[in-house]
Amino acid sequence: MAEVAQLSTSLRRGTLEFCVLAMVEGEDRYGTEIVRRFGEERNLAASEGTIYPLLSRLRRAGWLDSKWSESPAGPPRRYYALTDSGRSALEHFRTEWVSFRQTVDRLVGTGEA
Amino acid sequence: MSTNKTDDAVAEYLREVEVRLGSLPLLQRRELLADLEAHIAGERAERHVQSEGEVLEILERLGSPEVVAAAAWEEAGTTAPVGPIPRIALAPITRRRRYWPIAVVAGVILLVLLACAALTVSRASSVEQHPVAPVVGTR
């Protein structure tokens, strides 16, 4: 059990942030929305509270912008938007990821061919 | 009555997280606490959460204060260990406080010893000089 958890933690590291960037690529989303979306993905599932420090780092890196905005129901929400440098970081990841995935597939024997 | 209780649970949760954020930069600490607070308040409002049990469920999904704080340390790029962050941060300070008087006493003793040594040396050299002087004088 512990090893399974360790493996998914290792795999998540370095990839989760790009899933976050991709999530706000089309439209701005607020924190809890992003957190909930991750909760639905079993492979990515982490404690919801751990997503907020990640969002903070991405904002400090200049990949995300955030602003508080009133909500129709309930307290104000903090919306996240992709910045230009966040967009190019995401594009770069996409290219890298494809060739990375192909290499791993080839070496590990998980490829289709 | 039950709202007070759930508010207490939320406040305690946030406090437990805050304690574990220790020496992280102030703005990062404030940001995370504000995000968590907004998350909890938003979930309560959107899901029409009433009971204490439902609030505790929101907190459980957020993760234990240890887990959330550990994520904050990791994302801050600091090599702080997962567990007892505050203790590790405080240990050198308390130790320094404890050893401080000992250092002063040791310093005073050292000064006294040095003074004694200096006196002994100067007395010895003056004793040595006395026999030399008459010899020079007789020549």
Image (cartoon, coloured by chain):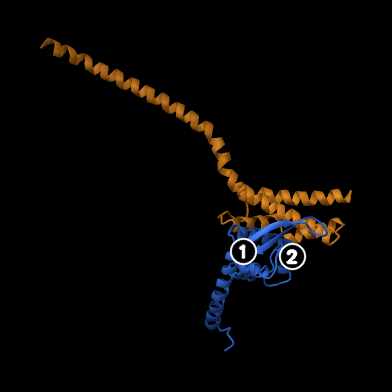
Chain colours: A blue, B orange
Q: Is residue B70 left or right of residue B58?
A: left
Residue B128 in percent (x, y) is at 23, 18
**Three-letter amino acid code at disc 1?**
Thr
Q: Quadrant for residue A13, please give it.
A: bottom right
Which chain is indicated by disc 1?
Answer: A
Identify the disc placed on residue B82. Answer: none
Q: Residue at x 62, y 59 (%)?
A: A59
Q: Secondary structure at mark 1?
A: loop
Residue at the extreme top of the image, as rendered: B138
Q: Residues within 10 Å of mark 1 (few under 14, many from 20)?
A: some
Q: Quadrant for residue A83, please give it.
A: bottom right
Q: Is residue A79 left or right of residue A62?
A: right
Q: CA distance from mark 1 to mark 2?
A: 19 Å
Residue A100 in percent (x, y) is at 54, 77
Front of the two marks 1 and 2: 1
Residue B3 in percent (x, y) is at 86, 51
Q: Pointer 2: what residue?
A: A33
Locate the C terminus of chain B and report the quarter of the image it occupies.
Answer: top left
Pick the residue in front: A71 or B105.
Answer: A71
Q: Pointer 1: what residue?
A: A83
Q: Quadrant for residue B74, please give it.
A: bottom right
